[in-house]
Image (cartoon, grey):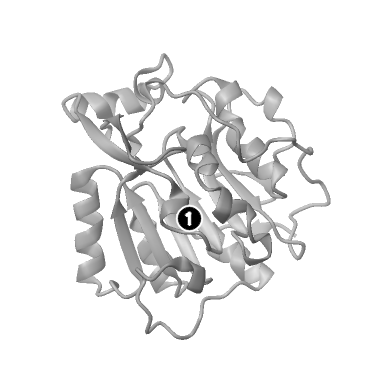
């Protein structure tokens, strides 16, 4: 049967429903408590307004990450307006494969990126226009690894305009130490023009090597997502990948090709 997909990122909540992942009924805890004690946690990386849905619709505790100061303040105000501070913690930092360093971020509004090629590359038309509208602004942002903040979560939504592989490499504990506790679902962007394919594909390959099955998630609301089995030949795909690691769920009998990618892999910046 076709899988009915709600608008992203709520596709994650649909998958949770199918595989039986639910949040705790007790929300009296503080979302800032180290997540080793909070298994019902979601992670929202890159303009984390979706944190509101994960908390309000799914009842999950959420750690959101935003590098741009004005966007961080925007999300923080919305969390406070909805009185969701007990469920949502927003961190003002960029995530990468290293900690305690800084890097230049190209401000293109909701398409901002640490990758120059994602904003000013030959095929980055819309992103270039947003960057121009923002006055060609750049911001020096701090870099931290995801494992510095969260080591236990049931799902991840990540939208960082091509920087996803670095973030995965910076989360070896979260992604590989306790697979039976999650993350069960990773919703990530894959866009062919953001950076060289050999670098872009490190993210899906790393997830594949950790036991995830990844699917191309089209825009249609009722679809049969296609297994992402041929990344080498995929040169024009620009949308989401939905990666699932659970024996109780599969869209089809087809799974991704085995990979030898390990968490020690490094990627090239810019």
Q: Please determine whether, in this image, residue 188 is positioned above or below residue 113.
A: below
* Quadrant of the image occupied by residue 203: top right
Count of labels in the image: 1
Residue at the farthest front position: 100
* Quadrant of the image occupied by residue 116: top left
Task: Tell me residue 236's x, y (percent).
Answer: 58, 25
Task: Tell me residue 254's x, y (percent).
Answer: 81, 46
| Residue at 59% from the left image edge and 59% from the top image edge | 183
Which is more toward the observer, 82 or 100? Answer: 100
Q: Is residue 150 visible?
A: yes
- Horizontal side, residue 127 vs residue 9: left or right: left
Quadrant of the rendering where the N terminus is positioned = bottom right
- Horizontal side, residue 93 vs residue 164: left or right: left
Residue at the farthest top position: 122
Quadrant of the rendering where the C terminus is positioned = top left
Which residue in the protein does label 1 denote? 9
Task: Tell me residue 4's x, y (percent).
Answer: 62, 60
Badge 1 crowding class, 10 Å Cα cut-off, few under 14, some 14 to 19, many 20 or more, is many
- Horizontal side, residue 71 vs residue 183: left or right: left
Residue at the farthest right position: 253
Q: Secondary structure at mark 1?
A: loop
| Residue at 36% from the left image edge and 71% from the top image edge | 31
| Residue at 36% from the left image edge and 30% from the top image edge | 114
Residue at the farthest left position: 135
| Residue at 62% from the left image edge and 60% from the top image edge | 184
Task: Tell me residue 243's x, y (percent).
Answer: 63, 49
Q: Is residue 221 visible?
A: no
Which is more toward the observer, 125 or 265? Answer: 265
* Quadrant of the image occupied by residue 5: bottom right
């Amino acid at each position: 049967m076709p899988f009915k997909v709600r608008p992203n990122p709520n596709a994650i909540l649909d998958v949770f429903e199918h595989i039986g992942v639910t949040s705790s009924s007790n929300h009296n805890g503080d979302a800032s408590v180290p997540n080793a004690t909070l298994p019902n946690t979601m992670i929202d990386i890159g303009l984390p307004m979706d944190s509101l849905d994960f908390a309000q619709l799914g009842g999950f505790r959420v750690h959101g990450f935003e590098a741009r100061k004005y966007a961080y303040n925007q999300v923080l105000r919305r969390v406070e307006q909805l009185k969701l501070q007990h469920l949502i913690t927003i961190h003002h930092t960029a995530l990468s494969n290293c900690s305690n360093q800084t890097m230049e971020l190209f401000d293109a509004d909701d398409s901002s990126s640490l990758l120059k090629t994602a904003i000013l590359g030959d095929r980055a038309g819309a992103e270039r226009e947003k960057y121009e509208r923002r006055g060609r602004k750049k911001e020096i942002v701090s870099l931290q690894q995801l494992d510095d903040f969260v080591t236990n979560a049931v799902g991840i939504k990540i939208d960082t305009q091509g920087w996803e592989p670095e973030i995965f490499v910076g989360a070896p504990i979260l992604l590989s130490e306790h697979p039976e506790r999650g993350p069960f679902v990773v919703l990530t962007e894959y866009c062919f023009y953001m950076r060289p394919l050999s670098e872009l594909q490190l993210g899906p390959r790393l997830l594949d090597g950790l036991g995830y099955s990844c699917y191309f998630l089209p825009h249609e609301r009722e679809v049969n997502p296609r297994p992402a089995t041929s990344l080498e030949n995929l040169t024009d795909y620009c949308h989401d990948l939905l990666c699932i690691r659970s024996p109780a769920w599969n869209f089809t009998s087809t799974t991704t090709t085995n990979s030898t990618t390990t968490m020690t892999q490094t990627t090239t910046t810019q």
